[in-house]
Image (spheres, rainbow, N blue to C red):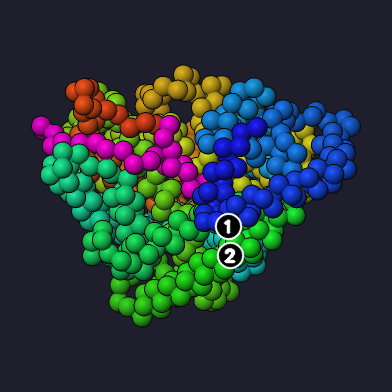
Amino acid sequence: MDREWLKLFFEENYPTQASGVVAAAVTVILAYSIHSLVSLRKKNVAVWHRKGYMEIPTPKDSYPYFGHMLSLGKKPFLQLEKWHQELGPVVHIDMGIQPWVLISDPYIAHELFVKNEVKSSDRMRHAFTYDVYSKGGKGIVFIPPNQEWKNCRTVADTILSTENIKNFVNIIEAVTDNTINRLKEVSEKDGSVSPVKYIQKAIFGIMISLLFGKTPGSIEDSLLDSIICMAENELRLAGPSGDIGSFLRYSSWVNTVTRKNKEIKSVVDTRDKVYGELISEAIAGETDCLAKQANLLKEKYNLDEMDLIIIMDELIGAGGDTTAASASWLFAILPRYPDIQKKMGEEIDKFIAKNGRIPTFSDRKELPYVIAVLRENLRYRSVTCLGLPHLAAEDVELLGYYIPKGTVLISSMPALNMNQDVFDDPKEFNPERFLGDTSTWSESTQGDIQSRNVFAFGWGKRSCPGVNLAEMNVFNICVRTFAHYTIEPTLGTDGKPSYADLNDILSLGTLYGPNEFSVKIVKRAV
Ligand code: HEM
């Protein structure tokens, strides 16, 4: 049994002496649960082994009470990929008492999430994300796809449309240029720079400016730090630590004993206060911004102040660290590929020579190689491990399999992106595979499954409404960096290049970004 996962789980989520109490209590209830489990198992077997349907394969390494939770190890994405390799594109696991079905094939995912979207677009009723964060049914991300969701989602789709976001391009470019300058200055002064924090602050800075019309003065800005801290707390609590009871039977009391419930309440109270004030200031201010625009749509879509607070927080929470992770992966991967950087630089130089300016997002079709690199970057290192889990609102018949109502439905992002039936030599970083496809990430996500090659933004009616903004932000960071610089590896003590470890992953909830690494930002000879 891989106890490492359990140890990590308690150390990360329940630090201090409370973890000892919790671990002891878990041992006691373990014995009791084994008894209950025998009868439960019989019931489960009947649900999953339906006459007339194929059985969904399940990995052997399951344990009483915890199911497959303990087998995920320190790097769950590797384990999920391994299970798919061994058992195929549809796999059933038990995360404690939650049944999960994992999908690693785009055609099957399309069948499940798009063709069956009425049955497969619900979300889990997680104690933190649903009861507390979404106040039992507000906002977009964590609620069922009902009329309230539709209203909030329409407001988000409207303010995040490409046409609308284009109006904020000056702010996006200014914050991006400041960050790149800062990276270059630190790199020149210290001999190298660790870009992850800078990129994260740039993206959150852009989000705060767009949403509230308030551009952070510098990367040391205290508002910027508090918003990042809130978003990270929320991401952490959206995992098992915010609702241990929905994963492990008889354990909901753990959050009371460890004072987790108090922490959960305090995180949300702070969110309500900070975002409430930011929205009021934005509405009263002169500057155009997304909070102001959403406020104008409030009546039409029957939203109240709390809906606005939750939507604004969700846009930052869902859009900040994900976009920053994608841009950070680019900085981690590209130092290994000077030839690719050279081709990108040449393409950007050619555009500048012809047009006398740096290309913007609207010029993306004139940079086919650059956009192929960005697509390959998105494929090669997934930004989330599990997307955002869906829930089966009804029983689903999926290509001869039977999936009972209440099952958590997961698109296994790294396994999908590394599926060799879809991508030749998937372990190779090869932008050429996407040359000739100049569709935007959004067009690919909404496109027909035969030509779709971007899976990172999910499926069907729940697919990401921030995809345009995400692509524009990553595009700008990339183009505005390579217009002037190259990203080079630092040198180890042996004088050899020292590259970022691409399997050293910072995992926060379902987010998967690179851990800290160092590079050199070097002025390019043009
Ligand atoms: C590289 C960056 C991003 C990635 C990889 C990403 C990925 C995803 C994924 C996988 C989902 C779940 C889709 C599903 O359930 O099938 C999602 C949902 C969502 N994303 Fe993004 N996202 C990114 C950026 C953004 C941005 C910039 C915003 C907003 C400004 C945003 C806002 C949202 C919201 C509100 C949802 C919930 C949609 C719903 O439940 O109806 N995301 N995103």
Nearest to the observer: residue 36 or residue 413: 36
Pointer 2 residue: 259
Point 66% across, 25% down: residue: 88
Can you see residue 283? Answer: no
Q: Residue at x 75, y 50 (%)?
A: 29
- Mark seen at residue 160: none
Element under disc 1: helix
User: Split into 4 quadrants, where in the image is the C terminus?
Assistant: top left
| Residue type (three-letter) at the residue carrying disc 2 | Arg
Q: Secondary structure beneath disc 2?
A: loop
Residue 225, image x, y percentages: 34, 62
Is 115 drawn above or below residue 306 in the view shown? above
The single residue placed furthest to the left in the displayed view is 525
Label 2 near label 1: C-beta < 8 Å?
A: yes
Give the mark nearer the N terminus: 1 vs 2: 1
User: Which quadrant of the view contains residue 46?
Assistant: top right
- The picture quadrant where one finds residue 371 is top left
- Look at the image and say whether residue 269 sits in the magenta stretch: no
Residue pointed to by mark 1: 18
Work out how far the residue at label 1 is from the one at label 2, CA to CA, in angstroms: 9 Å
